[in-house]
Image (cartoon, helix red, strand yellow):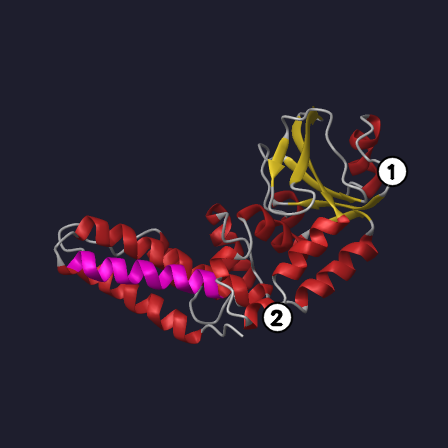
Amino acid sequence: MGKRTEEEWLAPLRERQLIPEGTRAAFIVGSVARGWHNPRSDYDIYLVSNPLHIAADASEAIPVPLEPPVVSVEVFYAQDKRWEVKYWSDAQIDQMLAKVSWEAYERGTIAGNVLTSIEELTLARLGHCRPLIGADWVEERRERLGGTAFRSFVIARSLGEADTYVEDALGQMETGDLESAVLSARQAFGHAVDALLEGTGEFGSHQPKWRANRFKAAAPGVLTFDEYWAIETMQTYDNADPRPWIKNVLALCQDIAMRVDVS
């Protein structure tokens, strides 16, 4: 992003009349907002308006279980980059925050069923976005998100997935299906690490490509980055005898699960 100003970021949108009346906030999300981008990265911007802006191309829309039931998308190319603008309404953001209330959590709502992946990613990105319009709006929503059970919901979901894959790996190992056990152990480890990172506020488990960067940003005390990376890249795996590697990974997953505070 360099030293580009907010207005320099907004200029391509203004030129294309993509900032409608009623805009409450606009903010950069994704790898660019976090400084993880590369020369091939897209520019992703979320824009919140009231009412919801509908893109000119009706085919560029994502269904969501909200009201209105769609996220509108505008895609264009400028400055040798692909720009993607997702349009949310103020009401949609409020509905997502309501879904992860403490009341919903205490009712025992199944964690994995609370939010769709796009909803979870949107809330997760609030914490590390760069506001272009409506910095006060962004800060207020960040504070509201911090007062919800969002963190507990996503940790519970990740730990549940990790436990499922641990059980799968143990059963597969017992029957001698070691190839499947290795794959299940890898899945279990990914979900366990996601839970560990979510415990520190590093959300975004639906994008495992950024897990290493999230780990570096979180610097959790349970594992060092080198210890994490050794397992992620299977450095000690022995194809002639995979059982020790599988058992070590599963034991580590269970250790992580005991150390992560869901509440």
Q: Which residues are magenta?
A: 156-173
Residue at 58 percent across and 50 percent down: it is 121
Residue at 72 percent across and 30 percent down: it is 55
Residue at 17 percent across and 52 percent down: it is 178
Give the residue pinned by disc 2.
102
29 lies left or right of 245: right
State whether residue 43 is above or below residue 103.
above
Q: CA distance from mark 2 to mark 1?
A: 34 Å
227 lies left or right of 49: left
Asked whether residue 200 is in view, the answer is no
Give the residue pinned by disc 1.
21
- Residue 158 part of the magenta segment: yes
Front label number (2 vs 1): 2
Local secondary structure at mark 1? loop
State whether residue 73 is above or below residue 243.
above
Q: Residue 259 at what x, y percent from top left?
A: 43, 75
Closest to the observer, 189 or 157: 157
Query: Mark 2: which amino acid?
Result: Trp
State whether residue 112 is above or below residue 1.
below
Residue 42 image label = none
28 lies left or right of 187: right
Q: Characterize the magenta stretch by its predominant secondary structure.
A: helix
146 lies left or right of 222: right
State whether residue 63 is above or below residue 105.
above
What is the quadrant of the C terminus in the image?
bottom right
Query: Mark 1: which amino acid?
Result: Glu
Q: Residue furthest right?
A: 21
Closest to the observer, 29 or 90: 90
Closest to the observer, 211 or 148: 148
Q: Residue 35 at what x, y percent from top left?
A: 63, 47
Q: Residue 38 at what x, y percent from top left?
A: 58, 38
Local secondary structure at mark 2? helix
